[in-house]
Amino acid sequence: MKKEIQIKKEFKKKQFQLVRGMKDILPEEQKYWLHIEDLVRRLADKYSFQRIGMPIVENTELFKRSVGTATDIVEKEMYSFFDKGNENISLRPEFTAGIARAYIEHGMLNLPQPVKLYALGPCFRYDKPQAGRYRQFNQINFEIIGEADAICDAQVILVAYQLYQQINLQVVIQINSIGCPDCRPEYENVLKDYLKKYRSKLSEVSGKRLSKNPLRILDSKEKDDQEIVKDAPQQVDYLCEGCREHFIQVLEYLDELEIPYALNSKVVRGLDYYTRTTFEIWPVEGEDGRMVELGGGGRYDGLAELIGGRPTPAVGFASGVERLVSLIKERKAPVKEPESLDIFLAQLGIEARKRAITLFEELYEADIKVTEGLARRGLKAQLELANKLGVKYTLILGQKELIDGTIMIRDMEGGIQEVVDAKKVILEVKKRLEKARVNVNELNKVSAIGPT
Ligand code: AMP
């Protein structure tokens, strides 16, 4: 009993904080998120991608089979647990597996192919929290499912490229082909033979990967590993005829679209489901010289079969939203600002407040950008808030105005106040706003012509 009281007392004192690796997205940051969501929606419309929403949880087995058991995500980073019905479920660490599951489950192969889908939302990985790396982060995903042609690879890369271009980020596509189940085994053997010569110098993780997942050693972040793989044999020299032809076509389309790319044999993406094209999006080096990968993707022709569907070719990409937001801020790329407000509605006294709540609705319905100080009491406090918000006019409704059937309009710039008929307030406000707009336009014209 004593202990319980003690715990209760401690909880009373405790100031809760974010769970490690999580992040709040505060109101002042929302403009970046809205801007990105807007761009994504417009790109999706332009290239006919339809939005899909999947649950955050899926069966753990889905990720084991698709992402692969010999990956960091499945080995170490999944939020997996048994629910109350004893089902083993996981918070999604990425979107593609869930999208492929939904495609199969809803019989989308009966729709005209390819099916183009996009998704936006949170993913979860129990990663080591560090700058730009969170345990809950958000991804944008674009997928083209049901078509093997290289034009789809190019279109997915084009969408990714345009997304970054439109936020003024210069990027280069790092591109590679990791072949298919026909030609990859031969390459893996050649690679293993090469790496075995350096076994003692490989990092511990890479040493373990040598037999199960040697491709992953190519994109190791360890310096010693990087030295070793610098001269490793490259998959592109071991592609079968079909994979080579496919890769050349993708590159030709990128040339046609004038998308800058660099062949990079170390881009292997690490997830089991990739085949043929793999790519990452890197910003052109920033002033600080850092290279952060903004997103990545590739072709995954074998995934549907791995999770119980028919053979279904597909290609897609994912981009992290947090990294985009921090780059937009860092590079001061322009984003759409929230719409400015025109009118502040101030009130004095209980009766005036009652009228103000309905007047607010009328102003809003009349398309006037209005905000209010309904929870504030004194006029001074309300005018201070109005000033802070930068509105052009404040409407003041007090006891006297209520009795007289009037309302006061205060010009916030000059402080001039005028009493108008309450019935005509919307008309009066619109007239003044229009006049202010004309004045601003005239001023802009004069400053464009310059002094005479
Ligand atoms: P991946 O599926 O690992 O290729 O991730 C695709 C993109 O998601 C990456 O390029 C990042 O932009 C983003 N991303 C992945 N993991 C994290 C994380 N832990 N925190 C923030 N962003 C992430």
Image (cartoon, rainbow, N blue to C red):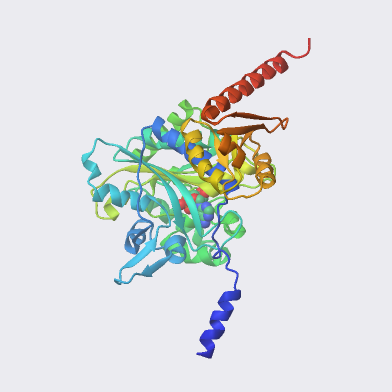
Query: Percent x, y for residue 89?
Result: 35, 65
Say left or right for 163 vs 437: left
**Residue beneath the point at 36% across and 33% down:** 48
Q: Is residue 122 above or below residue 163?
A: below
Exactly how many numbered labels are in the figure?
0
Residue 56: percent from left, percent from top: 38, 56
Q: What residue sits 58% from the left and 34% below the top?
A: 404
In the displayed orientation, state which residue is furthest to the right: 452
Residue 432 at x, y = what percent? 61, 24
- The residue sitting at the top extreme is 452
Q: Which quadrant holds residue 338? A: top right
Q: Is residue 263 visible?
A: no
Residue ranking furthest to the bottom: 2
In the rendering, at what x and y percent does residue 73 appear?
Answer: 45, 60
Residue 283 visible in image: yes
Left or right position of 185 against 215: left
Which of the pair 259/407 is nearer the observer?
407
The vertical placement of 406 against 91, above or below, is above
Name the residue rendered at 53%, 28% in the picture: 426
Q: Examine the rendered structure and indicate whether residue 273 appears above or below residue 173.
A: below
Q: Foreground residue, 330 or 242?
A: 330
State the residue in front, 365 or 398: 398
